[in-house]
Amino acid sequence: MGHFTAVDYVIFAVLLAASMGIGLYHALSGGRQRTTQEFLMADRSMSCLPVSLSLIASFQSAVAIIGVPAEIYTHGTQYWFIGCAYFLGLLIPAHVFIPVLYKLRLSSTYEYLELRFSKAVRICGTLTFIFQTVVYMGVCVYTPAFALNAVTGFELWGAVLATGLACTLYTTMGGLKAVIWTDVFQTAVMFAGQLAVIVVGVNQTGGASEVWRKVWEGNRISALNLNPDPTERHTFWTLGVGGVFLMLSLYGVNQAQVQRYLSARTEKEAVRSCYMAFPSLQLSLALSCVMGLVMFARYCGEDHSYANTLHFGCFPQMVIYFVMDMLEGFPGLPGLFVACLFSAALSTISSAFNSLATVTMEDLVKPHVPAMTEARATLVSKALAMSYGLLCLAMAYLTHLMDVSVLNVALKLFGMVGGPVLGLFCLGMFFPWANPTGAMAGLGAGLALSFWVGIGSIFNRSSGARPLSAGCRAALLSDNSTSAVHTALDNLTLSKPSGLNRFYSLSYMWYSAFSCFAVILIGLIISFLTGPMKEEDVTPGTIYPVFGKLLCFLPEHLKKKLCCVTPRGPTVSKIMDLSAPRCKEGNGLVLAQEDGTSHEELDRFLPEVQAAFVEHETTV
Ligand SMILES: O=C(O)CCCC[C@@H]1SC[C@@H]2NC(=O)N[C@@H]21
Ligand code: NA
């Protein structure tokens, strides 16, 4: 079994050192991280390429690098259909969420909730995000260390501490600029590591055609599963449609991603980064799926590995075992894969530390200490980033105590928590009548429902249990086991759950969609019961006139009736350039936003623009 040569440890150390070097560079260059605009928002000066790679890296952790190949090995390529969700999952953020959120010049995405609803709704959104991210970062830093330790004896808590502390250091030193640029470097390492495993694995299995033949015979290539049953874990519907809501909750409204959009130098750059994220997201999905297929082809023939997979509890550790076995005899490659694994973890937890520090600073600290000087605010932001880094180590220990299947936990967590927050933003952007009471009630109901189904599914094991993998099943059958085992295996296809059990066995891929709709439905009902908002009370620029856009063929007066809200008073923050072509729309004066104007120029324009509008309002 592959153990570590000095080369592998060196490669791991180089990865940590390079990441810290980038952090140090950004601590000593530019504005030297002296303002929160730079530390938290990278001076809003980023271009689309680093932003797009950082968007991928933030939610592509070791959980995907290990979990997806294990998923493909045991269940076939059905999971690959989640790639269909990437189209709408990135187009809607690019053309709906970014246009609204970018123009409001936010730092925390939850500021939107105060502008649209109330301070209380904002705080609830922030706390929900903090809970989700704190749990998630613990899983992300623990997973690679645990899997590696189980297979190669790599020091578990040494790896957790090294990763967590190195990441805390460079995130605290270099701010968002360092996080984004280390994400770029770490994404490259991730792709290189996965590619190396695939190339070596294919060669060792006798070439691509041989891999394809074994995979095909092992019926690992899943057909399009159009089964509409919502309790079936992975079908085209749960992945392709349910996956869109999972993507929207992450790439549309999650602080980590929104902060990257807002750090782009113009709105157009932000939209471009969303488009550029699409091919890299598809590539990373393809690499992890192909890695699972190569593993299956490499090991499905020989029976010796079944015992091993059985020994490793069949899943996450299995991937590491196979990779180390495959790469043995190629000095440096096991180290490269370890670097790939920890790059995935570092790029995710660094985004977590920085976004947690941002929302804590913007939503919880600043409103209570308005007179805080810029220097002190930056210092507090750095202290927050460091504190969250140390908290991450504690969460890693908690994850150790939980010992659960991590891909499942991560995706369930996003569905249970990310879905309701997505619902809150949709309620705010698409339904002008929604009021703060409705928003709070909706969020509360959505979270309660998703936790009910999520927690219920954990205790309701019978429905969630998935059929044993081909490997495990064969292992059980191979050592002439008793006929009892045979019968047990045969009727492993469970009896259809009924009633509440059916509710508990809802596929976790539907959690985001289910809780999002629950928030919107309940939010609207409560809003109408407590008096819907009038369009003049809605803060301009917080509504996405979805009816106006969808019903653009309707005559103007009808659109007015349908309350396609054009902001009544011009939202000064939208004004980018006085010379921009003016379009008169409704009774508001909405200036077409000229892109390319930097935020500095905007700040220069604002006073005269405000004066111009005051004068305009009085004359109109
Ligand atoms: O941290 C992980 O990698 C597990 C969570 C994956 C989050 C979703 S899955 C669909 C989308 N594609 C990704 O690579 N990440 C997000
Ligand atoms: Na990552």
Image (cartoon, rainbow, N blue to C red):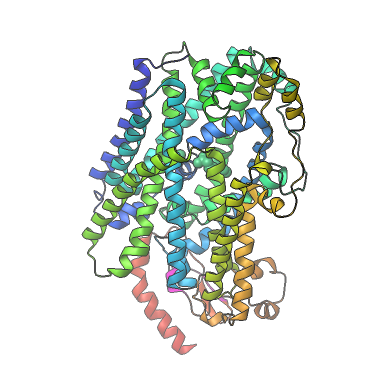
Across and down, in percent, residue 389 comes to 33, 45
Would residue 309 be visible to someone looking at this image?
A: yes
Q: Residue at x 22, y 64 (%)?
A: 373
- Nearest the camera: 493 or 172? 493
Number of dots carrying numbers: 0
Left or right: 441 as drawn, with respect to 470: left
Q: Does residue 576 lie above or below 186 as drawn?
A: below
Across and down, in percent, residue 523 comes to 59, 70
Left or right: 236 as drawn, with respect to 55: right
Would residue 41 be visible to someone looking at this image?
A: no
In magenta, the rendered stretch is 571-584
Across and down, in percent, residue 352 comes to 41, 47
Q: Quadrant of residue 13?
A: top left
- Nearest the camera: 273 or 528? 528
- Nearest the camera: 320 or 251? 320
Q: Quadrant of residue 96?
A: bottom right
Q: Is residue 581 magenta?
A: yes
Q: Does residue 492 lie above or below 571 as drawn?
A: above
Across and down, in percent, residue 476 comes to 67, 21
Left or right: 96 as drawn, with respect to 176: right
- Nearest the camera: 550 or 186? 186
Q: Residue at x 54, y 43 (%)?
A: 409
Q: Quadrant for ligand 2?
A: top left
Q: Is residue 247 magenta?
A: no
Q: Does residue 353 lie above or below 474 as drawn?
A: below
Q: Quadrant of residue 300?
A: top right
